[in-house]
Each structure stands twice: as structure tokens, then as C-alpha cells.
């Protein structure tokens, strides 16, 4: 059986740095309920948006405290956890996130649908330029879970 230390990283080069920066982000409270007219509609629209922001905040908290076990079990969707190594997810994330310091995220746009959400963000970390990223979230087990990270945003 191949040891984790000898396995190649999930991503390489700039995509690895981009993925790690996107994973290791702190959530900003820059959510705005767009497209609603009344105060009640804005409040109702904010509830799912706040739940998405809470999921991103949980992502940041677990990464900044290196609680990869909780991250894999509670913050990632089932699909994301499997893509990140399944049972080995905590170990792989620990290896992939080595060297990332002072991660930051700024949510620039949030789109919430019945089945999930897309957060368009700008990410950065110490020694790295700001990079546009997209974080996809799905509704799973009564909340929003991170399902995918992608470089770039529109």
C-alpha cells in the first residue's frame, strides 16, 4: 500500500495554491439580499444567504484550527469528501494546506437557489495575490455544505 507521503498532491502548481487559498478562507459579512422589494422579503432572502455565510465561516474555522476531521465530516458535502480522499480526507487536507498563512476571503456575489448556492469570492493568503474563486455549496443534511471549489469567477 502506498503511503500518503509518497502520493502526489491532489492538484499541482498554481491550481494547488489556488485550491488551498480558496479552502483556507475567512468569511466576510458582505452578503446583500438582492432583488427584493420589501423589508420582509429582504429578511427572508437573507436567511439562506446567512446560512451559506455560516458554512463558509465553518470552513474557515476548521481550517484555521486545523480541525480537518470536522471539516471533512461536517463542512464538506459527501461528494467533496469523497473527492478529497474519503476516509483519508483529513490527512490529505492537512498535507495540502501546509504553508498557507493568513487566508482571507471576500464574498463579492452570492447566488442562492433551491438546491444550493454559489459564492463568488476573492481569496488571498500571505505572499499570494488576490485570486477570483467560486465556491459551490449544496443543501445536504439540513444545511449548506461545500461541494466544489473552482478558480475564476464571473
Image (cartoon, rainbow, N blue to C red):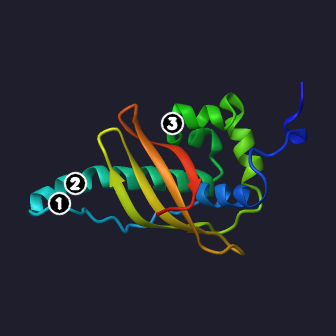
Q: Which residue is mark 3?
A: 77
- Where is residue 107, by image quadrant? bottom left
> In the image as oriented, which residue stretches furthest toward the top?
1
Relative side of 57 to 2, left or right? left
- At horizontal 73% and vertical 47% (from top left) the residue drawn is 94
Please tell me which of labels 2 and 3 falls first in the chain.
2
- At horizontal 53% and vertical 40% (from top left) the residue drawn is 76
- At horizontal 51% and vertical 36% (from top left) the residue drawn is 77
Q: Which residue is mark 2?
A: 45
Q: Position of residue 132 (x, y in %)?
A: 55, 66
- Where is residue 142, by image quadrant? top left
- At horizontal 24% and vertical 63% (from top left) the residue drawn is 34
SS class, disc 1? helix
Mark-to-mark CA distance, 2 and 3: 23 Å
Q: Which mark is residue 42?
A: 1
Q: Are marks 2 and 3 in contact (CB under 8 Å)?
A: no
Q: Nearer the viewer, residue 69 or 128?
A: 128
Relative side of 47 to 152, left or right? left
Please tell me which of labels 1 and 3 falls first in the chain.
1
Q: Position of residue 7 (x, y in %)?
A: 86, 39
Q: How busy is the neighbourhood of tag 2: few (under 14 within 10 Å), some, or many (20 plus)?
A: some
Vertical comparison of 116 with 101: above or below: above
Mark-to-mark CA distance, 1 and 2: 5 Å
Mark-to-mark CA distance, 1 and 3: 28 Å
Vertical comparison of 74 with 60: above or below: above
Q: Are marks 1 and 2 in contact (CB under 8 Å)?
A: yes
Relative side of 52 to 128, left or right? left
SS class, disc 3? loop
Relative side of 132 to 15, left or right? left
Q: Position of residue 90 (x, y in %)?
A: 68, 39
Q: Position of residue 22 (x, y in %)?
A: 59, 58
Amino acid at each position: 500500500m502506498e503511503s500518503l507521503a509518497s502520493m502526489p498532491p491532489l492538484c499541482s502548481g498554481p491550481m494547488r495554491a489556488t485550491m488551498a487559498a480558496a479552502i483556507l478562507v475567512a468569511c466576510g459579512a458582505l452578503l446583500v439580499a438582492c432583488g427584493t422589494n420589501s423589508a420582509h422579503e429582504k429578511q427572508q432572502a437573507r436567511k439562506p444567504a446567512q446560512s451559506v455565510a455560516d458554512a463558509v465561516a465553518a470552513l474557515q474555522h476548521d481550517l484555521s484550527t486545523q480541525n480537518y476531521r470536522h471539516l471533512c465530516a461536517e463542512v464538506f458535502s459527501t461528494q467533496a469528501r469523497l473527492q478529497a480522499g474519503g476516509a483519508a480526507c483529513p490527512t490529505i487536507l492537512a498535507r495540502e494546506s501546509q504553508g498557507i498563512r493568513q487566508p482571507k476571503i471576500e464574498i463579492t456575489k452570492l447566488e442562492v437557489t433551491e438546491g444550493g448556492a454559489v459564492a463568488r469570492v476573492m481569496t488571498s493568503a500571505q505572499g499570494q495575490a488576490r485570486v477570483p474563486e467560486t465556491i459551490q455549496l449544496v443543501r445536504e443534511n439540513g444545511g449548506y455544505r461545500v461541494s466544489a471549489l473552482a478558480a475564476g469567477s464571473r
